Amino acid sequence: MNRKAKMLLVLTLVFSLVLAACGKAEEKAEQPQKPETSAAQEDPSAVIEVSTVMQSDQYLKFDEGETFDNNSIYDAYEKDIGVKIVNKWIADGSQFKEKVKMTIASNDLPDFMPVSATQLKELTEADMIMDLTDVYEQYATDETKEFFQKDGGMQMKSAMFDGKLMGIPRSSNPYYLQFLYVRTDWLKEMNLPEPKTMDDLKTIAEAFAKRTENGKSYGLAISKDPFNVDTGVTGLRAFLNGYHAYENMWIEDGNGNLVNSDIQPEMKNALAALQDMFKKGLIDPEFAVKDVEKEAELIYNGQIGLVYGASWTPAQLVKGAVKDNKVVQEWGVYPIPSADSNPALSQIGLGADEYYVVAKQSKHPEGFIKLLNQWIVVDNHPTDEQKVYEYGKDLKEKGNNYWLLNPVRVGNQTDNNGVILPKAIANKDESILETKDQRTRYARAMQYLDGDTSLWWEYLISGPNGASSIIPKVQEEKHYLQNKFYGAPTPTMADREEILKKKRDEVFFKIIMNQVSIDEFDKFVAEWKKLGGDEMTKEVNEWYADHK
């Protein structure tokens, strides 16, 4: 082979190697990149550190020597699952949500934190949070995965964007029902009927408002934020439901489309009824400037004997019902009365309006999932040693509310408390109890029956005629109406919904307080549509067309 031929052969081989290398590089580039494996992932026994933010609570009392940053619950997580928790900041309830907004605006996110549904969408669009699809699949236990499917997966679907799991819902039971609480000692004293209809309620309200022994009395307790789902005492949602009206829900119109409940004719009927009660002096004229606790003082003082509230309302009523270890007020709990022959339907939502998100730059997203797994275990079937997560280092109930220190908390999407607890308490049979929550509630009810009047409230929640006992029938007979929209806020919703709510509250308050005619409602409807309501309705129905 001559020199020229040899040179040609060498060049050909070099060129072939270059082409092969390029091909491999392209093949490598086309392969999806796998997340880097951390030392902690390679060594399951290694301790990993994750940061979060915490909300302080007036009911949380620390054991001596412990703080938010150093406490027995944080120690337990580090010992049991190898996750060290660090608080980036702590804020009280009145400032927490605002601080979260500031944290997002400054792009200074901790490894994980709770956010609203709107913030979940904003963070996703800004590419600030992690797609949890793979890390959830890899690290969530079978129990955790089953836990989030009890509602058919609706709550988890609400956290998905383009098929990606961008958050974990702070789940709870969607059957967040409200009830009517009535002073039954007054019913007996005044020979009044139990409230089965809205006419009964009005009759009772008028009679109660005539009581004068403790000063001016009123018929129904209402506070300044009555339409908020969080107003579980002194709210008006259940009153509206009695007129088949619903606060800011998306309901079917009978033609396959969704409409907003705030602007339906039934809402006008409910407002007219409230206006009539206000004119008759059955509603505190200063309700619009009183928060829940301030309005509740009238209940504690025996000036109001009717209030709508959630299942936990007795825990607030106890402040007036028990004095000097004696029960001085007798209360009963009833289903929502209806204004006509059709049963009142309790409005319910998705059961999740907040989500845990993990920052895009988090080094240990698996740390959050491990905390989630552990919470589900210790909240549902703890060993004796794991009671530290609820009570602190001494492992016993002392009223400190130590469970509030758990940085990840999710609730069960379903429960059978209303079936089990009334029967167990009535028969004093703890053998049928199934969950930790049931055992805790049963124990408190038994303490009340044994003479501890401070636990009067638990008996009114869980006892034979308590709030929980009403829930099974509501579910069985489907006397509830669920919001049909469970997607992320639409663009117009994110931009205009709060403005529309403020406008609604302003007009509704003026109507209730008889400052304007009930016909002002019709003007509100027209304005609601112009201010973004029509566009929002269009967007919601575009979503609904793909999710029916």
Image: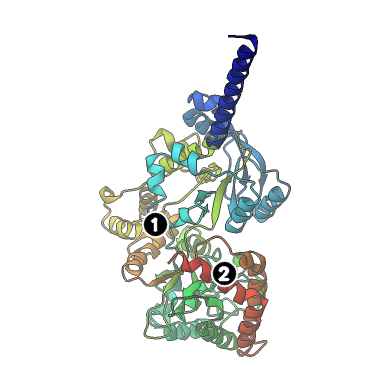
Residue placed most toward the observer, 219 or 497: 497
Relative to 188, residue 65 above or below: above
Residue type (three-letter) at the residue carrying disc 2? Glu
The answer to whether residue 367 is left or right of residue 126 is left
The image quadrant of residue 494 is bottom right
Where residue 486 appears, x then y in whole percent?
49, 63
Q: Earlier in the sequence, mark 1 or mark 2?
A: 1
In which quadrant is the C terminus drawn?
Answer: bottom left
Where residue 315 appears, x then y in whole percent?
49, 59
| Distance in Å between CA atoms under marks 1 and 2 | 25 Å
On the question of residue 227 being in view, the answer is no
Where residue 399 appears, x then y in whole percent?
51, 46
* SS type, badge 2: helix
Residue type (three-letter) at the residue carrying disc 1? Asp
The answer to whether residue 426 is left or right of residue 278 is left
Q: Residue pushed farthest front? A: 2
Crowd around label 2: few <14 · some 14–19 · many ≥20 (10 Å): some
Residue at label 1?
A: 151
Q: Residue 287, which numbered label?
A: none
Residue placed most toward the observer, 25 or 144: 25
Q: Residue pushed farthest right? A: 106
In which quadrant is the N terminus drawn?
Answer: top right
Q: Residue visible at 45% across and 37% down?
A: 138
On the question of residue 297 being in view, the answer is yes
Q: Residue 539, which numbered label?
A: 2
Residue placed most toward the observer, 449 or 3: 3
Where residue 152 appears, x then y in whole percent?
38, 56
* SS type, badge 1: loop
Q: How many marks?
A: 2
Relative to 37, residue 299 above or below: below
The answer to whether residue 351 is left or right of residue 363 is left
Crowd around label 1: few <14 · some 14–19 · many ≥20 (10 Å): some
